[in-house]
Amino acid sequence: MDETIIDTKALSVYLQVPESWVREYVRTRTSDPIPHLRLGKYVRFRWGSPELTAWLNRRLRGAKDLTGFCLRVAPKNRNHKSEEHLKGETEQ
């Protein structure tokens, strides 16, 4: 699977949560932090990685396993102002 490096904003857009929620779940004091890379003061995520897929799957309740689906729809536009770009990609 292809892995892309994304930032906190891109992950928050895809998960449809505030950036502050993503930042909170990156912190080590949470019981199961989001798998991430720390590049100095910057936090990045390996979109498409088995670790991130497994983290998302641990949060599913009564839904299908996301392996092979959810992480293929990586946001490509780094200046996300809305989720419109994701709608077009998921319909393809």
Image (cartoon, rainbow, N blue to C red):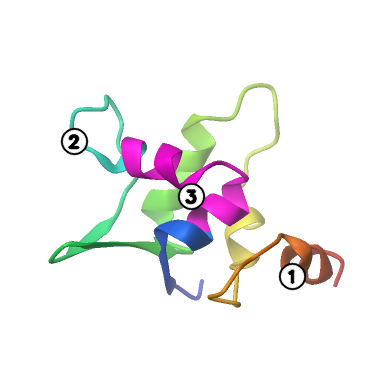
Report the Cα–Cα distance between label 2 and label 3: 19 Å
Report the Cα–Cα distance between label 1 and label 2: 32 Å
Q: Does residue 77 appear to the left or right of 90 in the view shown?
A: left
The residue sitting at 23% across, 38% down in the picture is: 27
Q: Which residue is the extreme one toward the right?
A: 91
Disc number for residue 53: 3
Magenta segment: does it hold 46? Answer: no
Q: Is residue 67 visible?
A: no
The residue sitting at 48% across, 31% down in the picture is: 58
Amino acid at circle 1: His
Dot 3 falls on a residue whose secondary structure is helix
Magenta segment: does it hold 15? Answer: yes
The residue sitting at 52% across, 42% down in the picture is: 18
Q: Does residue 42 appear to the left or right of 68 in the view shown?
A: left
Q: Which residues are magenta?
A: 11-24
Decide: few, some or many residues near mark 1? Use Cα within 10 Å; few <14, some 14-19, many ≥20. Answer: few
The residue sitting at 81% across, 63% down in the picture is: 87
Marks 1, 3: nearer the viewer: 1
Q: Does residue 81 appear to the left or right of 21 in the view shown?
A: right
Contact (CB < 8 A) between labels 1 and 3?
Answer: no
Contact (CB < 8 A) between labels 1 and 2?
Answer: no
Residue picked out by circle 2: 28
Between discs 2 and 3, the one toward the N terminus: 2
Dot 2 falls on a residue whose secondary structure is loop
Residue picked out by circle 1: 85
Between discs 1 and 3, the one toward the N terminus: 3
**Residue closest to the eye, 2 or 82:** 82
